[in-house]
Amino acid sequence: MQRVLVIGSPGSGKSTLATELARRTGLPLIHLDQQYWRPGWVEPPKQQWVQELELLLRRDRWIMDGNFGGSLELRLARADTVIDLRLPPWLCLARIVKRVVTSLHRVRPDMAEGCPERFDLEFLVFAARFSGAPRKRTDEKLSRFTGTRITLRSAAEVRRFLASVDDGG
């Protein structure tokens, strides 16, 4: 477990898990949201983003969290482990709402500078529908992944997984 992707629905706890896993393992942490977004929630040109991502992926060791489905195949080609968070949609949506309420207008630690938390209805709709077409596309790409795949379906499973990391697992 040297190059770990943490993926899942918005609100599934990707950044929280990745942060804790990095703390426990000593692997360098890369939040894709920090790398991707420019101040004011501006997206980078696609080719520039691909080049930046390729540089990050060349590193020998990392934990990388984020969806960014358009770049998943690039990331899977370099990862040795995928942690796929498949928590219930209702829980993910509740977490997003809580995150907006508690962090509104502030930049979260896992987010790029100049990108404060905001209420984004389009994002909520995407999260609500994530278990449909976005999940199917992700699963199709994951079906070709030959490394270690860990699927966690509840907060309790996430806690047990982290406990196993503490135990050297």
Image (cartoon, helix red, strand yellow):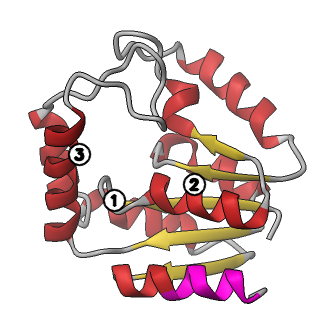
State the CA–CA distance, disc 1 to disc 3: 14 Å
Horizontal side of 27 relative to 23 (left or right) equals: right
N-terminal-most mark, 1 or 3: 1
How far apart in space, not on screen, are marks 2 and 1 (Cα)? 17 Å
Point 61% across, 23% down: residue: 49
The x and y percentages for residue 61 are: 84, 53
Residue 39 location, quadrant: top left
Q: Is residue 7 left or right of residue 41?
A: right
* Residue 93 rendering spot, x and y as whole percentages: 16, 58
Of residues 47 and 161, the one nearer the viewer is: 161
In front: 137, or 10?
Answer: 10
Q: Is residue 40 visible?
A: yes
Reply above or below: 1 against 72. below
For this view, does 78 lie left or right of residue 41?
right
Position of 111 relative to 144 (above/below): above
Residue in front for this viewpoint, 129 or 123: 123
- Amino acid type, callout 3: Arg
Q: CA distance from mark 3 to mark 2?
A: 16 Å
Residue 118 is situated, as x and y percent measured from the top left of the image, at: 19, 27
Residue 28, how many percent across, how many down? Answer: 76, 48
User: Which residue range is magenta in the image?
Assistant: 160-167
Label 3–label 2 contact, CB within 8 A: no
Q: Secondary structure at mark 2?
A: helix
Q: Residue furthest right?
A: 60
Q: Mark 2, residues whose alpha carbon is within 10 Å: few (<14), some, or many (≥20)?
A: many
Circle 1 is placed at which residue position?
A: 9
Residue 129 appears in the picture as rendered: no
Q: Which SS class for mark 1?
A: loop
Q: Which mark is residue 19?
A: 2
